Image: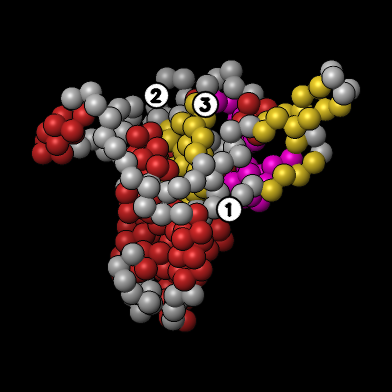
Amino acid sequence: MVERLLISLLTGGHVLLEGVPGLAKTLTVRTLAETVRTSFHRIQFTPDLLPADVIGTQVYDQSNGQFTVKRGPIFANIVLADEINRAPAKVQAALLEAMQEKQVTIGGVTHVLEEPFLVLATQNPIEQEGTYPLPEAQVDRFMMKLKVGYPSKEEEREILRRMAGGTAIPVEAVASPSQILEARAKIAELYMDDRIVEYIVEIVHTTRRPADAGLKELGPLVEYGASPRATIALAQASRAHAYLRGRTFVTPDDIKAIAPDVLRHRILTTFEAEAESVTSDIIVQRVLAAIESP
């Protein structure tokens, strides 16, 4: 999870973290923000939240008879959208323009968001009470979806040792926004062979037309495959994955490592798949196993 969050920071791709309450999703995002000398805002999504509470609104000033813009919490370098699926679709849609275009519109005026801009959202499993499923158009805006599970016994003992004392653990800022943007420029220049490009395209295409790769049995299980945005995200994330390992080129192993997190939320399964307990993760693994590495 930590490495994937670093990849998102180094590529500018938004991340959706899913897991039951109490797994330190919020703490992880807040700690990541503290390690960068930048602005950070947290938005707690609730059923009564309004779009203006997220992006801001116009306020009438009686002293001069004019409207002024009151900016919302979306105006920050790192935004934590906590429990994003507890708000109705209208509020979730308020994030769409900000996440894709890196800008918001208030009162007909467009305001550009300062780079780096990153939305790190947490959500509870949709089976939990009081949750709303995110629209497919919004889910596609997230570069990666990470599933956060329970810690092992050893990890939980370490959690107990660190957190049970009640004292805050100091976090040191180790990077600046300019350093992040500089790293992004280097990552964008990492070498990607034409065979790697073809490998990425083949993977994404197979999620839409499994029969083309000899996976006819997956056809009835997939409602919609991954979008072209998945192709771009897979290339960007695999470059960052290679960068974190000190390499200047992308290998098929980078693609295989990052593909489940990039594709799992972009493959919509059918009711037949649900009846057979076939998840999008299983479909991604079968696609990766069917396509020969370059």
Q: Looking at the image, what colour scheme do you see?
A: secondary structure
- Which of 58 and 209 lies nearest the eye of the viewer? 58
Which residue has dot 3 on it?
45
Q: Which is closer to the viewer, label 2 or label 3?
A: 3
Outermost residue toward the front in this view: 63
The numbered disc on residue 271 is none
Please give the count of numbered marks on the rendered protein. Answer: 3
Q: Residue at x 38, y 34 (%)?
A: 26
Name the image quarter holding residue 93. top right
With 200 as the anchor, is 286 left or right in this view? left
Crowding around mark 1 (Cα neighbors within 10 Å: few <14, some 14 to 19, many 20+) is some
Q: Which mark is residue 115?
A: 1
Inter-mark Cα distance, 2 to 1: 35 Å
Can you give x and y, in whole percent of width and height, for residue 77 in the image? 54, 45
Residue at the limit of the structure toward the right, as seen here:
65
Q: Main secondary structure of the magenta part?
A: helix
Range shown magenta: 87-105
Tag of residue 128 = 2
Q: Is residue 101 magenta?
A: yes
78 vs 27: above or below:
below
> The residue under label 3 is which amino acid type?
Phe
Considering only order in the chain, which callout, 1 or 3, is on the residue closer to the N terminus? 3
Q: Quadrant of the C terminus?
A: bottom left
Do the numbered discs 2 and 3 sit on residues whose CB atoms are within 8 Å? Answer: no
Q: Is residue 208 left or right of residue 240?
A: right
